[in-house]
Image (cartoon, helix red, strand yellow):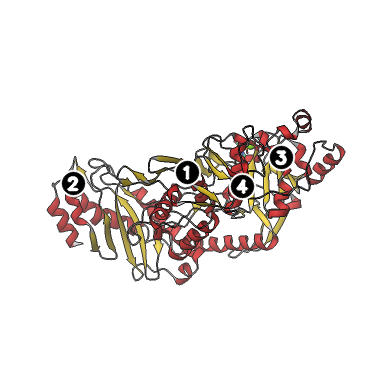
Amino acid sequence: MKKLQQLLYDIDGKSYKAYKSIQGRYSFHRFEIMIDYVQGDPFAAPSKIRIIIPDAYRKMYSNWKDNHHRKVYAEDIIARSVAEAIHENTKVSKGSGKSGLIAIDAPGQEILERTAVTIDPNHVTICLSIGLPANGRRINGKEAQKLFIDIIPGILSQSVFSIKDERIEQAVQLADQHQEIRRQMKENGWVAFVADGAILPRQSGVSNKPLNHAVPFVSPKENTVEFNIPHQSEPLTGMAIKKGVTLIVGGGYHGKSTLLNAIERGVYHHRKGDGREYVLTDPGSVKVRAEDGRQVTCVNISSFINDLPHKQDTRNFSTENASGSTSQAANVVEALEAGASTILIDEDTSATNFMIRDQRMQALVSKEKEPITPFIDKIKQMKDQLDVSTILVMGGSGDYFDVADQVIMMDQYKPINVTEKAKEIASSYPSKRHIHPDESFGSLPKRSFSQNSLQTRRGKKTKVQAKGLSTIIMGKTDVNLQYVEQLVDHSQTNMIAEIIRYLDQQNILKQQSLYQLLDMIEQQMDQKGLASFAPFPNQHPGDLARPRRYEIAATLNRLRTAQVKDLL
Ligand code: ADP
Ligand code: MG
């Protein structure tokens, strides 16, 4: 600490570049600070430091860190406490650029594995970004001293050193509960569980926080299940959705999309108080939508699309500008290729001609003239031949009654199981549309990406960088992830960018199928951690959070530079 103080004193007033000399390791009373990266000027990306706190100064009990899930939740709650303490100490900005900034990669509503806080067997590491203070382009050593000697230790005192054991204990108990719900789901073949009392709607399209005064969820009695979870005497009750085809119907504005959105986010775990903390979904669920204009590279979409006007081969379909229906077809088969076990679809974001084709239209436009086999004619084959379930919001067509295993109606935000009624209606008004019941689903793509899919050069430099939640800049092109709806945290996007950079450097793309590649990436995340993909894995690795394999695949699938071979 004295050494750092002296250094800052010495460089006070010098040109900003002199800050580079403070890179290194400094001992404080209860922790060490590692200054890993020093920004080049006050306006550049902030400097990166790590705080290392030995177990002796902040005990982390073994039952918080021995089990992977519990450890992620304990790390998450500590990151939240640091973020709260930073918030309370917000700087009155002193100096130019990012002077005085202190930030941690704070979690949102989800509890994700992230690099912000890591609990190791003998110490805790906290990764911060800081703006080293300047006046113009001159070092402000006094403010820098204040930052390191007063403010940062103060923030640590108010967070990691004072967070109550009970708060961490509660966080890890939620991990146990989530794992138990997941175990129940697996054992009973449920693809989704929505607890009674859950709050599903969000404050707004841009806020992920619960809506105030919302109507709490109540399960229909036909779907209600009850089971015990740890750390709670009352059993948990709620709606279970079994594997198979589930239709969500109901009038406009009655809460259909809200239910599906909560289900699609249920692949992640949510913090206490979110309203969705007991809403969980098959982790292999993928939300699929229409996405006009997206790049598609060598995807076998022949299950859904055939005989295009210019005799384009749909077993090996590429376009730089897909239509609504072809993009949605590609999104379905790419999800299946990556290993999805449940497909989620909302009519609001679907291409109508991909979803339905009624009797009259079949009569007017013969099958030979219509390239699209609508989803309704494949949904059963998907279930029977591929063991892939579907949850579908469809208020506009009763044709789906024929193929649904169950029908849930949203009525003023209350779900009602109307399966029997829908089946009755289906038999009293039989649909005369022509179906092809014994058709097979068709073949799926099994592709490998060649190494030069990754065109990461930008001038003389390599550039792969996330920009916000939904853009990755790779070399000279941008990858647009705006419609990849289950990408929820910009640090996941950072992580995907790091993975691409890593794949580029390691030269390991070719020879393996996309599926195997995703397995390999997941295995490395499991065994070596997220930081193992970063350029300096033993330093501050950047703000990284764990993405799912489906969102990694979605990124590769949207590369405008992809070069792909189907291995079948
Ligand atoms: P649909 O898809 O059936 O047309 P939405 O799911 O889009 O309907 O919901 C319509 C509106 O109702 C949204 O503004 C949503 O926030 C609100 N909403 C949904 N569920 C609830 C609820 N349980 N309590 C209060 N408002 C809700
Ligand atoms: Mg809707």
Cα–Cα span, label 1 and label 4: 17 Å
Which residue matches tag 2?
Answer: 16
Count the marks.
4
Q: What residue type is labelled 1?
A: Leu
Q: Residues within 10 Å of mark 1 (few under 14, many from 20)?
A: many
The answer to whether the residue labelled 1 contacts the one labelled 3, judged by CB atoms less than 8 Å apart, is: no
Which residue matches tag 4?
Answer: 333
Cα–Cα span, label 1 and label 2: 38 Å
Give the residue at x 49% y 65%.
Answer: 68
Q: Could you say whether the residue bearing mark 1 is in a helix, strand or loop?
A: loop
The answer to whether the residue labelled 2 contacts the one labelled 4, judged by CB atoms less than 8 Å apart, is: no
Q: Which amino acid does label 3 sit on?
A: Val
Q: Could you say whether the residue bearing mark 2 is in a helix, strand or loop?
A: helix
Q: Which of 233 and 32 is in front in this view?
A: 32
The x and y percentages for residue 556 are: 49, 48
Q: Is label 1 or label 2 in front? A: 1
Cα–Cα span, label 2 and label 3: 62 Å
Q: Which amino acid does label 2 sit on?
A: Tyr
The x and y percentages for residue 544 are: 41, 53
The answer to whether the residue labelled 2 contacts the one labelled 3, judged by CB atoms less than 8 Å apart, is: no
